[in-house]
Image (tube, helix red, strand yellow):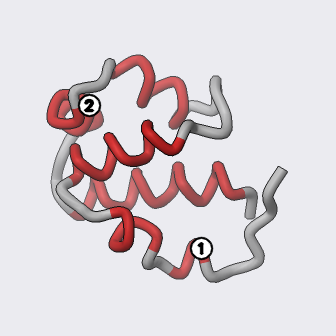
Amino acid sequence: MEFSNAIRQRIINLTVENKMSLNQVATRAGMPYSTLNSFLNGKSNDPKFSTIYLVCIGLDVTLSEFFDDNLFNENVIFD
């Protein structure tokens, strides 16, 4: 799995687990909804680390918690 796809899937999984909408995550993160939506829809790839950090804030998880998932333990491809 590509690294960006693993990040996408993790965001989706955490959003569902926390029963939050993407708009709620973006609002709590202080970032434009369009930024999050563009990444999740594949219109943009390779999010900046600062974007991942803001998403973690919006989801109320630490970076460690975000990356502590089997999605990142598989054969992740970095392009």
**In the figure, residue 17 lies in which quadrant?**
bottom left
**In the figure, residue 74 lies in which quadrant?**
bottom right
Instruction: Classify mark 2: helix, strand or loop.
Output: helix
- Judge whether 59 appears above or below 63 on screen: above
Query: Is the N terminus in the top left, top right, bottom left or bottom right quadrant?
Result: bottom right
Q: Which mark is residue 3?
A: none
- Where in the figure is residue 69, as x and y percent of width and height? 47, 77
The amino acid type of the residue labelled 2 equals: Ala
Q: Which residue is mark 1?
A: 72
Residue at the image position 41 percent from the left and 52 percent from the top:
11
- Judge whether 18 appears above or below 22 on screen: below
**In the figure, residue 62 lies in which quadrant?**
bottom left
Q: Which residue is mark 2?
A: 26
Residue at the image position 74 percent from the left and 57 percent from the top:
2
The amino acid type of the residue labelled 1 equals: Phe
Residue at the image position 54 percent from the left and 54 percent from the top:
7
Residue at the image position 24 percent from the left and 62 percent from the top:
61
The residue lying toward the viewer, choosing from 3 and 9, is: 3
Q: Earlier in the sequence, mark 1 or mark 2?
A: 2
Q: Residues within 10 Å of mark 1 (few under 14, many from 20)?
A: some
- Where in the figure is residue 63, as x and y percent of width and height? 37, 63
Instruction: Classify mark 1: helix, strand or loop.
Output: helix
Mark-to-mark CA distance, 1 and 2:
23 Å
- Judge whether 31 appears above or below 78 on screen: above
